[in-house]
Amino acid sequence: MSAVLEARPAAVRLRGRISPTLAAGVLIIAASLMLAFVPGWFAPYDPLAFDYRALLQPPSLAHPFGTDNFGRDMLSRVIWAYRLDMQIALFGTLFPLLFGCLIGALVGYYGGWPDVLFGRVVDALITFPFLVLVIAIVAVLGPGLINMYIAVGVVGWVFYARLLRAEIRIQKQQDYAAAGKVMGYGDGRIILRHLLPNAITPVLVFWMTDMALVILLGSSLGYLGLGAQPPAAEWGVLIAEGKNFMTTGWWISIFPGFAIVLTGLGFSLVGDGIAELLRPQR
Amino acid sequence: MRSRAIASEAGPGIALAIRGLATTFAMSTGLVRAVDGIDLDVRAGEVLGLVGESGCGKSVTLRSLVRLVRPPGRIEGRAIWQGKDLLALPERELRDVRGKEIAMIFQEPMTALNPVLSIRQQIDENLKAHTGLGRAERTRRAIELLDLVGIPSAAERLDSYPHQFSGGMRQRVMIAIALASQPRLLLADEPTTALDVTIQDQILKLLLELRDRLGMSVILVTHDLGVVAQTCDRVAVMYAGQIMEVGPVVEVFRNPRHAYTLGLLGSMPGGGAIRQPLRSIEGAPPSLVDLPRGCPFAPRCTFVTDACRQRRPDLVQVAADHLSACVHHDQVAKAVS
């Protein structure tokens, strides 16, 4: 009887283990992605259209999030900003993720002098606060999204590499790695098929957190004028635009802020959910 | 030229000839001699027991044979397997030997199976790597293997994951995976230590049965003399990285010719006379960084004389098919009778 129960297909086993945490996170992120892909379906107005008859309107039925000093509808701007900010979350983390995992897996598995060199590079890079380093690089390269991706890429991979290196070093001591070797498997196969699935969970969790962090970073740079450039709708840019009207038009900055918090929460929930889901059972 | 020398060294019926195997680790405290120059033959189709206390180098010996020793470990010596020196083989060729001709099972079936891959995937991978079987044939063979190691309703269990099996079942799975490519030599590193006694018995019987059916040789590392008595054809007793005594199990247990073996047997219930207290061996094994010049057992030995401390005793033939590295093997023999 128990044999039959335990032999259920993987899909069924997974369904039982999807936690409310993960479900809530996935819901938020799925909604965010939808807004990012087809903002036109949801935004009531053109995000860039000025309306001089409706300047600095507080939230109302016509403009649920109010309007800014050019009469642009804030709801539409916040929705259109999803496109840019989700793009930042993805592109800002993709290179660090892939490159970091490659380096981390290699130095973790083989060790030796590249590992020592890697340690020094990590030390050098994390000596500086992340934000300061990114701002410095963007300042040199010039403001703009592409340069921001470059700056994040140059620094961000270190965190992924460090995580995966540590995990791989633990996993390669396990008997199953030795067993793989005795079975005559090559290094590539042992790393990719045996060690990586056991080592990747913390990296995936960090990836989710990192997306939230990169959105914050993108917004910070946008706020400072080093990231996305006006009039593009980006949450950081929107908050920056509202800062002169904080006392009279609080709604301009508040709603983009909520969007950042909500999206960040979504990514964090997904991260926690993944951690729980992928924890290998012993 | 060299191959002829190797062939003559590995006599008829010898599957694996180990010569001067030494595995050392350069640590900050000094050079650790985990395996200190051992010579040992494994015969075709036999179960050879490798016994000794914890830390005497038996596991390292086993791992050295398939070069599973990580830096800073260094392996020296030769291990002649089918005319090839395993310790000098290029990595590429070694990979063909590993898994296909020589397989290994581990002490902790918990950690020796990959937790994220199903049993089918793990057996399939080995079959794919070492046989030319097609997909359907591989599945059939996988079921056959699980049957062979005594896993009930094998076909249904194929897609289970390691955590869904009990410890004993997991060890069976481990054995099934190791045997997938029909190796000629099985290295078993304390395969029953983590299991309770009844399961231990089943697994050992299974190993013997498989040895008979597949005609392979087995090196069984254990610290349990009971396991040796039950399972092995011959036994090699290790101490401080050296071989103390080698011989057929019955012969070594009845007529030990080394003071250390005598001590080991005396510390085991049923080894001494009836209604005698168990005798422990006083003292502790020497540090592997700073081995005594002579016999490593000399500091704890009751037979010790100056000759023991002068130089390391050679492993010499003391009876038919029975080697001992004890200066006073005659006296040990007298003490037994």
Image (cartoon, rainbow, N blue to C red):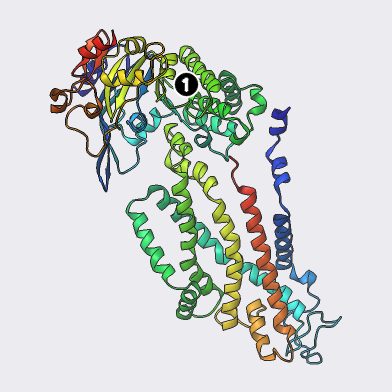
Q: Residue B23 sits in which quadrant?
A: top left
Above or below, A200 against B288 in this view is: below
Can residue B275 be seen in this snapshot?
yes
Residue A84 relative to residue B243: left or right: right
Q: Camera-side residue: A195 or B96? A: A195
Q: Residue furthest right?
A: A61
Marker count (numbered) = 1
Identify the residue at horizontal 45%, vertical 54% (top origin).
A104
Task: Locate residue A269, reporting x and y percent.
Answer: 67, 60
Above or below, A183 against A121 in this view is: above
Amino acid at pointer 1 = Gln
Residue B253 relative to residue A161: left or right: left
> Which quarter shows the C terminus of chain B?
top left
Can residue B20 be seen in this snapshot?
no
Task: Locate residue B217, reporting x and y percent.
Answer: 40, 17
Say few, some or many: other residues with alpha carbon within 10 Å of mark 1 (under 14 / 14 to 19 / 20 or more).
many
Residue A158 relative to residue B83: left or right: right
Task: Locate residue B322, reporting x and y percent.
Answer: 27, 12
Identify the residue at horizontal 37%, vertical 14% (top origin).
B272
Identify the residue at horizontal 53%, vertical 38% (top origin).
B114
Label 1 element class: loop
> Which quarter shows the N terminus of chain B?
top left
Residue bearing mark 1: B182
Q: Camera-side residue: B300 or B140? A: B300
Task: Locate residue A225, reporting x and y percent.
Answer: 57, 83
Q: Camera-side residue: B137 or A185? A: A185
